[in-house]
Image: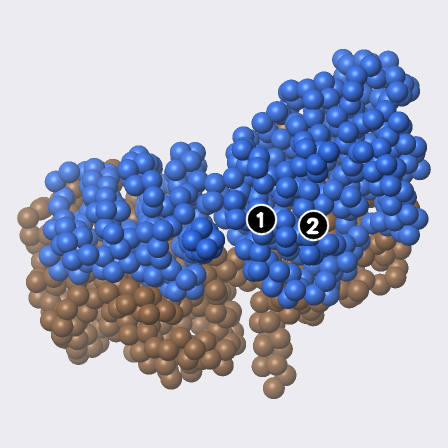
Chain colours: A blue, B brown
């Protein structure tokens, strides 16, 4: 069976067996079975427990052999000494995929390392695979699957995560949303390549995000990653960069991270985008999900705040973009709306135009001017992408640009538009804008421009590949 | 009069005259007078308007000369052609401080530049000073003063802001909170040095944040900044770093920003901390406000998430800190609480200890283990500061560490404790933690460690200064 097909038993299982589930349920019980049911998993579930006839309303079976069904995925969470015997049972039963949640293997001592190797050997012999140990398992929002004891928000978005951590279940949704996720844990068998090959042709995934503490087979990783990155953006966060980080990674997932520069060079060669930190990884995941690739380097900044415009212009140079020169006719059309003394440049400051007449309400002027200016710059052929710095000044009065931004995004589907929302109502407006799925809101101009710059960088790579 | 004393007329005026206020009031009217009154300014207010006898319930005066009071601060918001005559009136009246809100002077053309110089000359001759033009004025939460048409959140916190932008009024509170603020606008007269000298001995200000597009008198800036930075941390965000940023800065506040490297070198020499972006500036402002300076480089990371611990350990090296080795007795005491197979290292992973018994509820164990571990590491002499990575895993169930963090902060006032909150309830928990004023919550480990690293950097500078 091809590795790709086998990975489906992990991510799209039709039947799941759970071995070693606590009988405690309810508030903060960290009960995997209970979570699985509450999430509404669209598959068959079999608890295995010799001491119970029923758990959470499901019939429990004394052993795996007693389960009267084929098992795609078995999750093992028993104490370490009994894990190997259960793995042997899985092999005998012909379970297609096995995930070991239990900690304390290669992440702890040499005996643990040997046990791990033995489990991999047994399962390989039976045509099965091992995820973990020391893993929270997998998540797949599209079939309401969540094998962790935590309760992540699972949403059907086209981001696939492959991580040597279960944090994407519990901690990073605010930054790194995932539609499907794999916690590799100690990465004894199933590794980044298996995950990448699964996501390569998965129609539900458009962006792949990796959290890497260490990679064992660098040559194979580069081969697979390069192939996948030609089809979908791959964004890597690599830790264990430093002496202390290395030490911490060793006891976390037993990785022997190599020289950091080698990772950087390898990523560059196979066009995996390395994120500087978790915030950038989340920024890029959202950006690649929602925005078209930039067809050129020309950025236009439309702003309510002069200083934000200056900061955005600086960031432009940092991230390989260019401030679009704008055609004379674009400048003239915008100048017509504005105060006579204003020189129209890029960044385009919309504030004077909003101030140029005072007959209609501020909100009306704000919407009208923003729409007109955004339309003009989006039509300008020197502009390949737009940063709109919206201003929401007062606590009670809302200047909400959502409608205008959606209009522009829909009218100009080839030019990404991203936003920064200044002001006190920004959390509410930010949420409204984000929910449209047509733009990404960033907390600062620097981060907005960085994301566009990296989208452009990826577009250039794809352009080279396509024409070669 | 010394500059320092004169700056008090801007920031602590007892009487304010407003010239050129629109008669429109209410929702989104951007009426400065209305804002001033709504904020509850603790001083006397005089609207000047030849066409009205009363505005917003206050008696209006046809000219400044008619106001039967001494004026500390006059705000001018008339159209450009009438600004100079009003400035002349201010000089005749003996107004102590003048702020020109009107745009379109040196930020627009040569005539504007000459007008600006003329205004400065006239006011200097009368023993007064000019703020702006092109300024939103000043804010001082301690006397409920806000001269801008926007409605910022003004809170009595010890952060003073001096900025070539009014954004701190409208847009950046989420990042950069301010207790007092000065918008220098075109910086024709009142400049960074004047602001720094005001904040130097101001008992209500402990941290000074600058947003700089350009500085004219570099030598004087360095002299003043170096003196002030010996007493209080000064954090600068400098824009106009790039070709495009420079161009944008020129039309925003008419600054001729010089070579960026010179600014960096100057900042380093006078121990002004340069922030990379607006997020770092806000992080540092909050950190310096609330936390003690670190007395050494030893950081201890206490974490619910292994991968977050690795990322924090990496950041440690990036920002000049060291992972504290921990005394053998500290490790032994923590190991006693944990599972037998766990090696206690720094980062200290509290998860196994929380899992080591299952009799009490998860919340109880979480609080008990966190408190015990944090106490042990805070007592350890190799630890100079703590990063606590709290985990809040489930949407309905709240693991709230606020009480424990406050206890540790109060019991160990010489060791800063900062937090990162992972998980779905994090916004609520973050707000609770932040409100205590005893810690700072950062959105990522990298930013938490960066802030501690820069606190340590500043402490080293102060140490050198004190012993020299």
Q: Secondary structure at mark 1?
A: helix
Residue in view at x 37 percent, y 78 percent: B259
Chain letter of the residue carrying label 2: B
Q: Is residue B339 above or below residue B86?
A: above
Question: Depth check: B340 or B337 in front?
Answer: B340
Q: Point out residue B303 in the picture as x, y percentages from the top left corner.
A: 72, 49
In x, y percent, where is residue A325?
25, 60
The disc at residue A227 is 1
Q: Nearer the viewer, mark 1 or mark 2?
A: 1
Viewer-nearest residue: B239 or A85: A85
Residue B424: % across, % down? 60, 37
Residue A281 showing in the rendered view = yes
Q: Residues within 10 Å of mark 2 (few under 14, many from 20)?
A: many
* Residue B20, picture quadrant: bottom left
Look at the numbered disc 2 and give the secondary structure of its residue: helix
* Horizontal and vertical percent position of residue B275: 48, 65
Residue drawn at x 50%, y 60% is B280
Q: Chain letter of disc 1?
A: A
Instruction: Tell me where residue A405 sits by quadrant.
Output: top left
Left or right: B348 in relation to B287: right
* Residue A374's disc number: none
Vertical comparison of A83 with B68: above or below: above
Extreme residue in the bottom direction: B468
Which residue appears at 64% of the width and 54% of the height? A222
Does residue B59 appear anywhere in the picture? no
Residue of label 2: B307
Whether labels 1 and 2 belong to a single chain: the reply is: no
The Cα atoms of the two marked residues, 1 and 2, are separated by 27 Å
Q: Residue at x 73, y 59 (%)?
A: A257
Which is nearer the eye, B191 or B145?
A: B191
């Amino acid at each position: 069976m091809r590795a790709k097909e086998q990975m489906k038993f992990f991510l799209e299982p039709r039947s799941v067996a759970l071995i070693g589930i606590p009988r405690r349920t309810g508030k903060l019980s960290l009960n995997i079975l209970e979570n699985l049911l509450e999430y509404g998993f669209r598959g068959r579930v079999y608890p295995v427990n010799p001491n119970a006839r029923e758990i959470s309303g499901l019939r429990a079976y004394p052993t795996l052999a007693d389960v009267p069904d084929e098992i795609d995925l078995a999750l093992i969470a028993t104490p370490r000494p009994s894990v190997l015997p259960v793995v042997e049972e899985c092999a005998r039963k012909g379970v297609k995929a096995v995930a070991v949640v239990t900690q304390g293997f290669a992440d702890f001592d040499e005996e643990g390392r040997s046990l791990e190797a033995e489990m991999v050997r047994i399962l390989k012999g039976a045509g099965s695979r091992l995820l973990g140990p020391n893993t929270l398992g997998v998540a797949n929002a599209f079939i309401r699957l969540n094998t962790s004891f935590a309760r992540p928000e699972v949403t059907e978005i086209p981001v696939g995560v492959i991580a040597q951590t279960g944090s994407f279940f519990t901690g990073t949704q605010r930054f790194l949303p995932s539609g499907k996720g794999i916690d590799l844990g100690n990465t004894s068998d199933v590794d980044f390549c298996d995950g990448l090959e699964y996501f390569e042709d998965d129609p539900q995934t458009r962006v792949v995000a990796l959290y890497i503490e260490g990679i064992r087979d660098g040559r194979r990783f580069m081969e697979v990653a390069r192939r996948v990155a030609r089809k979908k953006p791959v964004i890597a966060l690599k830790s264990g960069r430093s002496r202390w980080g290395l030490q911490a990674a060793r006891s976390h997932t037993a990785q022997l991270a190599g020289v950091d520069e080698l990772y950087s060079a390898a990523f560059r060669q196979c066009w995996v985008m390395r994120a500087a930190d978790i915030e950038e990884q989340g920024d890029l995941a959202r950006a690649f999900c929602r925005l078209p690739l930039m067809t050129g380097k020309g950025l236009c900044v439309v702003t309510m705040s002069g200083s934000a415009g200056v900061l955005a212009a600086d960031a432009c140079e940092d991230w390989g973009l260019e401030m679009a020169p704008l055609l004379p006719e674009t400048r003239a059309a915008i100048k017509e709306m504005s105060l006579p003394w204003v020189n129209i440049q890029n960044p385009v400051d919309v504030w004077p135009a909003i101030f140029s007449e005072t007959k209609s309400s501020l909100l009306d002027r704000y919407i009208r001017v923003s729409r007109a200016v955004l339309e003009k710059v989006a039509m300008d052929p020197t502009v390949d992408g737009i940063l709109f710095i919206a201003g929401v000044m007062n606590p009670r009065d809302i200047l909400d640009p959502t409608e205008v931004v959606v209009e522009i995004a829909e009218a100009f589907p080839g030019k990404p538009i991203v936003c920064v929302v200044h002001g006190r109502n920004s959390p509410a407006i930010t949420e409204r804008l984000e929910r449209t799925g047509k733009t990404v809101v960033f907390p600062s101009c620097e981060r907005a421009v960085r994301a566009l710059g990296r989208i452009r960088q990826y577009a250039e790579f794809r352009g080279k590949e396509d024409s070669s």
